[in-house]
Image: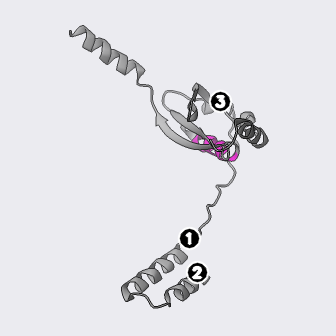
Amino acid sequence: MGQVADAVKIVSAPVMPGLKRSLIAVAAVAAISGFAPTARAQPAPVPQATNDAAAPTADNAVMLTVFFKHDQSRPLSELNAQLDRQGFYKAFPPDGVEVVSWYVMMGIGQVVTLRLPASRLREVNRILENTAWGSYRTEFYPTYDYKPTGLASHEKAQAAK
């Protein structure tokens, strides 16, 4: 309730009546919904059992492309030291997650495409939150293999000439 009281004090200053009502309403909604200005970490992941059910198969696998955008304001040696301290290369990629490709894109950082069971997506996300953040900003993109379709379309178009 302290957040609402603080908001009411803020809007007690002379302001337009409509704006005052809006600010009070926003403050009340924020207090009721448990809004906090700080991010909350997810609880630690439940360890995954390593068995055949956890392996990616045609009916449960997803591909995920991760952009690791490096902090260009810091030297590479400093970024690598932070990755070592945070255990990045010990934890990533986790066992049982296939690395489809891993490239360096000059001026960007690294781009890694993984194939994994959908049930392990959260685990991969938490590993990156705990070990990559600080050295990298991460972006995630669901990915699928279009190469056979694209090449078949190309061949069909070439044959129609």
Q: Secondary structure at mark 1?
A: loop
Q: Secondary structure at mark 3?
A: loop
Q: Is residue 131 left or right of residue 25?
A: right
Q: Quadrant of the N terminus?
A: bottom right
Please report the residue visible at 33 percent of the width from the left and 15 percent of the height from the top: 152
Numbered badge on residue 3: 2
Please name the amino acid that badge 2 sits on. Answer: Gln
| Mark 3 crowd level (few <14, some 14–19, many ≥20, 10 Å Cα) | some
Badges 1 and 2: C-beta atoms under 8 Å apart? yes
Which label lies toward us, 3 or 2? 2
Q: Is residue 158 left or right of residue 95?
A: left
The Cα atoms of the two marked residues, 1 and 2, are separated by 9 Å
- Which of these two is toward me, 151 or 97? 151
The Cα atoms of the two marked residues, 3 and 1, are separated by 38 Å
Residue 110 on image: x %, y %: 59, 32
Give the residue furthest to the left: 161
Which label lies toward us, 3 or 1? 1
> Over which residues does the magenta segment extend?
120-130
Please report the residue visible at 54 percent of the width from the left and 83 percent of the height from the top: 7
Number of callouts: 3
Residue that carries the numbered disc 3 in the rendered image: 96
Please name the amino acid that badge 1 sits on. Answer: Phe
- Give the colour scheme shown: one colour
Residue that carries the numbered disc 1 in the rendered image: 35
**Magenta includes 123?**
yes
- Identify the mark nearer the N-term, 3 or 1: 1
